[in-house]
Image: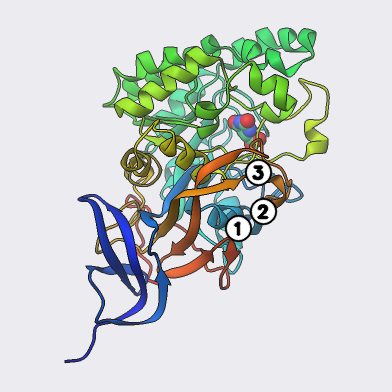
Amino acid sequence: MTALRFDLIVRGGTLVTPGGRVQADVGARAGRIAAIGDLGGAVAAHTLDAVGLHVLPGVIDAQVHFREPGHTYKEDLATGTTGAVLGGVTSVLEMPNTDPPTTTAAALADKLARLKGRARCDVGFFVGASAGNVGELAELEATPGCAGVKVFMGSSTGSLLVADDETLAEVFAGGRRRVAIHAEDEDRLRERRPLAEAAAHVRAHPEWRDAETALRATWRALALARRFGRRIHLLHVTTAEELDVLDECKDLATFEIPPQHLTLVAPDCYERLGTRAQMNPPIRDGRHRDALWGAVRSGLCDMLATDHAPHTLEEKARPYPQSPSGMPGVQTLVPIMLDHVAAGRLTLERLVDLVAAGPARVWGLAGKGRLAVGFDCDLTLVDLSARRTIRSADMATRVGWTPFDGVEVTGWPMATVVRGHVVMRDGQLVGEPHGRPLGFVETIAPTSPA
Ligand code: DOR
């Protein structure tokens, strides 16, 4: 009898599968999971020792800003995806507020072309809605590799903005895929900006961009989405009040919470980290953080996503509120969340739901999100008991810092596998970049496995 042959066998780990935790080997062939079980008699071109490790389906970060083109001194697709795989992330969805913004077919095609030979994980791109391109969104969102349409209802980094209900209605009326929404009400932001100017300290950030600012935009988005029968996804939900609305809208709206908002808390984060803790929507006080944890634990929340948004320390040193909003996050998603698992704040199974199955389901990522035969062999191998310290110096991001510098965590990503290729092991990059555009079930142009 000839032995079974695989391209890769991951041996001896504890797999977190939809059927529960199982002690088994994983065999990959042609980029997919071909077998799960005792593969002791099988042979493979490559083997990865997972004894003592937990093997998760590849972690997906569904909101990152990689700044290419336009601001590659902060990040680019090579450095951003390097941080991803060093942190155990196998797929990312990248945001359109680059320069130029991803608002045209040419800009989207340009971004997709830039992945080749440079991206270390798989990448999908959102296109940005603007008053100028509402007529083209239906066509743009049907492009293979496109994650869907993103709307900035309030201004943040970059020029993208759809502040009025008329334009938002046009966005919802054209196209059919789920629309990603940054929900902060622009009128209220403009009205309250003097508060931030007067305070001249970042601790005023959650006052300027207050809970009402988020809630108003969320209401407007939900009302219009219902009118047009369009599914939406609320990006980075940060308030208790929004959760009270969103739990009535599961037929219409999914939502995500950033790990930063589960981990940092105001006012402490602003006193300790200054403008490095400044992001939109803001980190808020303990009442909101507790409510967000409630939505994580109850199952209401669909996914976590980091909003990885690098700015240089020099830019961050500008006096508030001229300082830009955003912080890196893609490389620390797994360690920070494993530490919460170690502290008993959520189960490993719920974490897998939030960072793999959840984003794959919401965004329709073909072949992603599960550790099961037939799915892509994307794996995040973690040591649940490793104690490590997060260090800015170890971050691949071009801006060279993390808000979690010096934080000791329990739990660490030890290896990353993308479509059957080991791309990180023990903190070291392995092999050449071979990331490619993600396949989305709604636009599918299935590509042959790598
Ligand atoms: O804090 C943020 N930074 N929020 C956003 O919405 C955009 C992001 C960025 O691109 O810098």
Binning the other alpha carbons within 10 Å of mark 1 as few (below 14), some (14 to 19) or many (20 upward) gives many
Circle 3 — which element? Answer: loop
- The quadrant of the picture showing ligand 1 is top right
Circle 1 — which element? Answer: helix
Residue at figure coordinates x 53%, y 35% from the top left: 129
Front disc: 1 or 3: 1
Way the structure is coloured: rainbow
Q: Where is residue 46 in the image (x, y as percent from the top left)?
A: 42, 79
Q: How far apart are marks 1 and 2 (CA)?
A: 6 Å
Are the two marked residues, 1 and 2, in contact with CB atoms closer than 8 angstroms?
yes
Vertical comparison of 221 with 109: above or below: above
Q: Which mark is residue 304?
A: none
| Location of mark 3 (residue) | 98
Q: Which mark is residue 396?
A: 2
Residue at figure coordinates x 58%, y 60% from the top left: 427
Residue kind at label 2, given as amino acid type: Ala
Does residue 437 appear to the left or right of 57 in the view shown? Answer: right
Q: Position of residue 367 (x, y in %)?
A: 32, 58
Front disc: 3 or 2: 2
Residue kind at label 3, given as amino acid type: Thr
Q: Which mark is residue 82?
A: 1
> Would residue 322 be visible to someone looking at this image?
yes
Residue kind at label 1, given as amino acid type: Thr
- Decide which of tag 1 and tag 3 comes sooner along the chain: 1
Circle 2 — which element? Answer: loop
Q: How far apart are marks 1 and 3 (CA)?
A: 19 Å
